[in-house]
Amino acid sequence: MALPNLRLRTFALALALTMPAPALALDNAPQQSTFWEDGRDGWFFYESPPEPEPEPEKEPNKEPETVAKKTPPPAPEPKKQTPKPQEAQQPEGPPALSAAWFRENLEKYEDAAWNNPTVENVRAYMYLQRYVMDRSEQFAQSAQLAVLGDPVLDETNRRPSASAAAQRQTERANRTRNRLVSELAEEVGMFFFYSSTCEACATMAPVIRELEKDFAVIPISLDGKHLPGNPFPNMRRDQGHAEQIGVPRAPALYLAAPGEIFEPIAHSPVSVDDARHRILIGAYRQGWVTQEEYNSARPIENLDVDLTRMLANEDLSDLQRDSDTNFIPPNELMRVVKEAENSFFEEQSQ
């Protein structure tokens, strides 16, 4: 097996001897030892020469860095998490058993009980109705506690509950009313429209005769005839007066003042007291009596204790609000009311 190596070495030596001089100059360069020089290796002449050291790998040419910085790659999008199934949200609404809840739902329970009157449906509605009645009773009891002794809320400050005191108050108011009506009769008169076939007109005749004690009353017959019994001998036939005034039907009673001013009093039978009361109201509406005179003829006292007047000059715009409806908390509202009330009674006492 050493023969091929020997031939190869012999051929290399012959080739070196036949090369030109320049090539021989290369012999001066160090050469590997030949077989003849390496005979000392003995049978190990076939040892392969050492493998050449691997050349260092060349680093790849780096591209010149550009001035502009490269845009970093976008961050990976976060993984979308599958939403966990949530319980269905309950619709918003008024708290159960509140006033708003009852306004919206009580009729529904009533309809359910009426449409399907099972024991359960009817009992549910009746229990809710019982709840409403119990709450109303609590409200009534609290109302009594709130009213008792309050000069603004206690109605007995205007009209006494004692029958004897209430009767005296009524008598006093009637005397004042009659006086004002008698004084008014000196300035205005009355027109009484009737028809001879009108039973209501005949019923009204005695009342008109009583009013004639104070007022100058002109009876006007729509059909030109007298009532049964001829209660108004000075009757006048209608000559367009009813159309001019706008009388809708008979009987009709009007106040008449200079300047063609007509104030309707009644279009049906009324009592004498009711007629006088209506006359005073008509006179007040026309401005023939003042507010103070009108109040003095009413069977009510302390009408000047008026909450609308007390709060007329109060500025409520700065008070605390709870919602967009401008709801004022009760404690805030009562603070302003009590301040106005105290100021009013302090002025009254001076």
Image (spheres, helix red, strand yellow):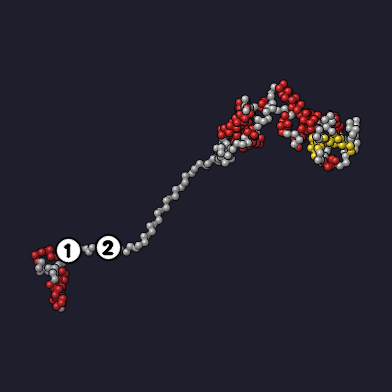
Within 10 Å of disc 1 (Cα), the crowding (few <14, some 14-19, many 20+) is few
Q: In this view, does 74 lie to the left or right of 244?
A: left
Residue 124 is situated, as x and y percent measured from the top left of the image, at: 61, 32
Above or below for 152 versus 42: above
Residue visible at 86% across and 35% down in the picture: 218
x and y percent of residue 312 in the render? 63, 36
Determine the image quadrant of residue 107: top right
Q: Circle 2 is placed at which residue position?
A: 59
Identify the residue position indicated by label 1 in the image.
50
Q: Which residue is drawn at 89% across and 38% down?
A: 237
Say whether residue 248 is visible.
Answer: no
Q: Residues within 10 Å of mark 2 (few under 14, many from 20)?
A: few
Check disc 1 and give the amino acid type.
Answer: Pro
Q: Name the one closer to the observer, 162 or 301.
A: 301
- Asked whether residue 73 appears in the rendered view, the answer is yes
Secondary-structure class at tag 2: loop
Q: 94 or 247, which is in the foreground?
A: 247
Residue type at tag 2: Glu
